[in-house]
Image (tube, helix red, strand yellow):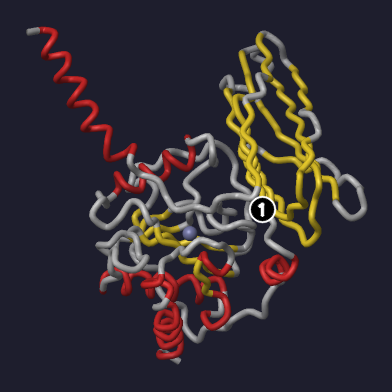
């Protein structure tokens, strides 16, 4: 009898865990990925410095996202440093300091990189560099130039009110693993989640599932959910990372605000609906008026930068309608 009840409990636990473990999102497959558990550790010491080997790249890359998991004793300070070797000149950059996530984006490609970690801990606890994940991409000079270039500001004639957005506390987000890097939001990239689909959507639990996947899966290992905003099929908007923080959704991420619509909008799957349209137009209107982002030029689908079909034909084909609706919103109340 006891034995059976244990089996039943395991069975129940499996059912309860299933919806969360089934969640993953449709992020890019990078051109380069490295996951290392380096075993760097100090215990009972106040200082440690570790330098990784030089990692040579088979092909030049212009976007590298480095994410590190630290195992930190409460009073310790750990800093990461990364340097990059330019392909053309063979010159190394200076070491650039970061907390636990760093986005490298440059017009010039790099052929190698190296990292260093410095640990300080007066409490003499145990500290380790548990894992680092590096995801690289060749964005290409033309697109990179477009992304890094500071555009002429779009002057909206009204300040569009901020729509109701479920805060991170509201959906019970985990705190980020460390400090964000900040950027100026200049362009908007629309994504779909692909999976979860609309039928798999379960409100805040779905958003937490995507966050867990982005933070815990070793292929990503990011410091937080990758997107800045997510919109459910019910039209509810959730805050991901602050939009002023560099995200992890579309390399090179810098200056790009990522909005993920939950659902699969490839043909013959989910359909965009009125609630999604209304919330997205509201959010876009607020972002454009707050950050001077021109709807005519700077609303993109993820596919504009990636071989993926994201955000699916059905959403992508609506981009002109969204642009028009935002322009109407922002000009109406002159
Ligand atoms: Zn996408």
**Taking 96 as reference, is 182 left or right?**
left
Residue 188 at x, y percent in the picture:
53, 68
185 or 230, which lies in front? 230
Residue at image mark 1: 137
Residue 241 at x, y percent in the picture:
49, 51
**Taking 71 as reference, is 96 left or right?**
right
Residue 147 at x, y percent in the picture:
66, 68
The residue shown at (27%, 62%) is: 233
How many numbered discs sit on the rendered protein? 1
Residue 300 at x, y percent in the picture:
52, 72
- Above or below for 135 versus 217: below
The residue shown at (62%, 13%) is: 125
- Above or below for 199 versus 211: below
299 or 266, which lies in front? 266
Label 1: how many residues lie within 10 Å, few (<14), some (14-19) or many (20+)?
many
On-image quarter of the C terminus: bottom left
Residue 276 found in image quarter: bottom left
Q: Which structural element holds mark 1?
A: strand
- Above or below for 22 versus 36: below
**Taking 61 as reference, is 237 left or right?**
left
Residue 1 found in image quarter: top left
């Amino acid at each position: 009898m006891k034995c059976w009840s244990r089996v039943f409990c395991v069975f129940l636990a499996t059912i309860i865990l299933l919806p969360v473990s089934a969640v993953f999102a449709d992020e890019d497959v990078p051109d380069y990925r490295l996951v290392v558990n380096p075993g760097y550790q100090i215990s009972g010491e106040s200082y440690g410095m570790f330098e990784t080997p030089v990692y040579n790249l088979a092909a030049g890359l212009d976007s590298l996202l480095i994410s590190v998991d630290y195992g930190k004793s409460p009073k310790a300070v750990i800093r990461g440093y990364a340097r990059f070797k330019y392909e053309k000149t063979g010159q190394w950059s200076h070491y650039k300091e970061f907390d636990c996530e760093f986005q490298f984006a440059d017009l010039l490609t790099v052929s190698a990189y190296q990292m260093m970690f410095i640990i300080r801990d007066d409490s003499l606890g145990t500290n380790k560099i548990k894992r680092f994940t590096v995801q690289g991409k060749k964005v290409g000079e033309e697109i990179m130039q477009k992304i890094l270039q500071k555009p002429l500001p779009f002057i909206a004639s009204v300040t569009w009110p901020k729509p109701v957005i479920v805060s991170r506390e509201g959906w019970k987000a985990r705190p980020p693993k460390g400090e964000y890097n900040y950027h100026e939001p200049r362009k908007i990239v629309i994504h779909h989640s692909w999976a979860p689909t609309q039928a798999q959507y379960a409100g805040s639990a779905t958003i937490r599932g995507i966050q867990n996947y982005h933070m815990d899966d070793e292929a990503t290992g990011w410091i937080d959910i990758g997107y800045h905003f997510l919109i459910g099929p019910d039209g509810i908007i959730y805050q991901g990372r602050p939009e002023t923080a560099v995200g992890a959704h579309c390399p090179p991420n810098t200056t790009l605000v990522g909005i993920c619509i939950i659902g699969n909008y490839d043909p013959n799957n989910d359909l965009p609906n009125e609630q999604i349209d209304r919330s997205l137009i509201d959010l876009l209107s607020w972002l454009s008026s707050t950050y001077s982002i021109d709807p005519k030029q700077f609303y993109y689908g993820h596919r504009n930068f990636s071989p993926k079909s994201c955000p699916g034909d059905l959403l992508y084909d609506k981009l002109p309608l969204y642009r028009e609706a935002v322009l109407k919103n922002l000009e109406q109340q002159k």
